Image (cartoon, rainbow, N blue to C red):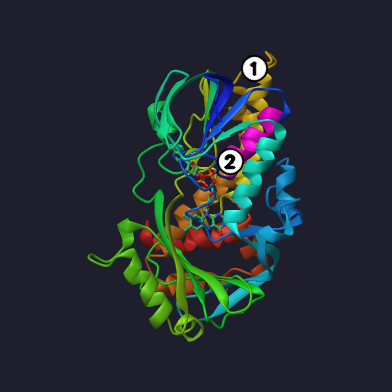
Amino acid sequence: MIPQDYYDIIIVGAGPAGSTAATYAAKNGASVLLIDKKKDIGTPLQCGGFLPHYEELQALIPDAELPFTLENYPADCVLTTTNYQRFISPNGDSKGFEVNADALDRRRFDKYLAKEAVKAGAELLVGTNVKSINGTTIEADGIFGKFTFNSKVIIGADGPNSMVARSKGLIGEPDPMGMATALEYELTGVNVDTNAVEMYFGRDYVPGGYAWIISQGGDSANIGVGIRNALCEKGVSVRDYLHRFMYEHPVASEKLKNGKIVSVISGLVPVGGSPKVTATEDTLIVGDAAGHLIATNGGGIPTAMVAGKIAGETAAEFIAGKCALTDYEKRWRAQIGLEIKTALYVRKLMDGLMRSDAMMSSAVKMISSEHMKSLQRGRLPDPVKKTLLGMNMGFA
Ligand SMILES: Cc1cc2nc3c(=O)[nH]c(=O)nc-3n(C[C@H](O)[C@H](O)[C@H](O)COP(=O)(O)OP(=O)(O)OC[C@H]3O[C@@H](n4cnc5c(N)ncnc54)[C@H](O)[C@@H]3O)c2cc1C
């Protein structure tokens, strides 16, 4: 494959955001190059793979136009299906609500999305690292050689700590609590509830975050911890916290302690919200690169894909002379801005509560299952706001 040296749109990163952007940009007539440094799209895996079903997503982000790929992904991308989400307090009490969701095989899912982009007409270049960006010129280097590409638009879909965002100055306010570190294992030989996804809270196991058990069907599960370094005990690593959770947690260890580790997965989760500016006259940022994540739970697949669709469509319209590239900004904020902003606000309130296990346990007790579901959806019902603000006064 010999790529051309010019494309209307170059997209850096073939994760959910980038592949979706490429699909919609190519469908709308632009010439598109999608570049990823991974030799094998989707690998290494950096995700738990929890994805609510299409109908749930319509309720979760009601103003969003969902890409078709969130509805019609192949059955072999799904490891198992769950119908319950359970929260376990630091004191061991639990509460939950019904939710229809898949545990995805992200390796397959990401490949499926990249193939859809190719089907739509995008050029895909794997194993190629974008090293630098100067205006709309990209220098890249990888297994197929060194390249210089020119374009009219660059879309940065290159994940947390985006190189595109940094090189264009599209970064938010510094926030020491705005980045979570996640470590997870795929385990076999566990004895978990195959119908539920579980989220555990407690300072000793997951300071400033939560631990999860996502069944992958049968005796397999993805388990992990997402923590904030600013709240960790000195000298205790993220691996120490994951092992504490797996082997010592009074509820979880009974299910996990005999598990054997099949793979180790780590990554960053940007929970600091979106920067004020995500579009310039020649560049857009999208997905994790733009903080398109629900900060309360770190879920970012659907929001990355919704914003990816908007980025791809807007960039193609811009190429056709039908809109300004910066229209992207108001378009994505109109579709998913409220949920991202509300989730960030709630995350900040929860940060206060998470400093105390007793407070966190009371919060889980006081908030009804229905309201918990709303919180997960990036909504903040008034009674919950009152409760959280009241409880937070002790930490103000
Ligand atoms: C441990 C963990 C568990 C998670 N679990 C869930 C979950 O269960 N459900 C959920 O919804 N979300 C989850 N998330 C969040 C979710 O994975 C992300 O929100 C989602 O992947 C964002 O998609 P993206 O396309 O923006 O970025 P990414 O998926 O990170 O894709 C970015 C791509 O850019 C490429 N790239 C980066 N730099 C360059 C470069 N210089 N040159 C070329 N390519 C480059 C990378 O190789 C990568 O393929 C989890 C995150 C982590 C870390």
Residue at 71% from the left image edge and 33% from the top image edge: 120
Mark 1 or 2 closer to N-term? 2
Q: Amino acid at mark 2?
A: Ala
Between 90 and 287, the one lying in front of the other is 287
Q: Quadrant of residue 142?
A: top left
Q: Amino acid at mark 1?
A: Ile
* Residue density around tag 2, few if under 14, some if 14–19, many if 20 or more, within 10 Å: many
Q: Residue at x 41, y 75 (%)?
A: 245
Asked if ligand 1 lies within 8 A of label 2, the reply is yes
- The dot on residue 17 is 2
- Image position of 42 with respect to 257: above or below: above
Across and down, in percent, residue 39 comes to 48, 45
Query: Outermost residue, top direction?
Result: 321
Q: Nearer the viewer, residue 80 or 91?
A: 80
- Measure the C-alpha gap from mark 1 to mark 2: 20 Å
Q: Quadrant of the C terminus?
A: bottom left
**Ligand 1: does it lie within 8 Å of the C-beta at label 1?**
no
Q: Residue 207 appears in which quarter of the rendering?
A: bottom left
Question: Please, is residue 274 above or below residue 27 in the view?
Answer: below
280, 296: nearer the viewer: 280
Q: Please give the name of the residue rendered at 40% of the width and 50% of the height, measured from the top-left corner.
A: 179
Residue 18, quarter of the rendered image: top right
- Where disc 2 sits, the SS reads helix
| Residue 277 location (% of width, % of height) | 49, 29
Q: Which residue is mark 1?
A: 319
Per the rendered image, the range of residues in magenta is 16-26
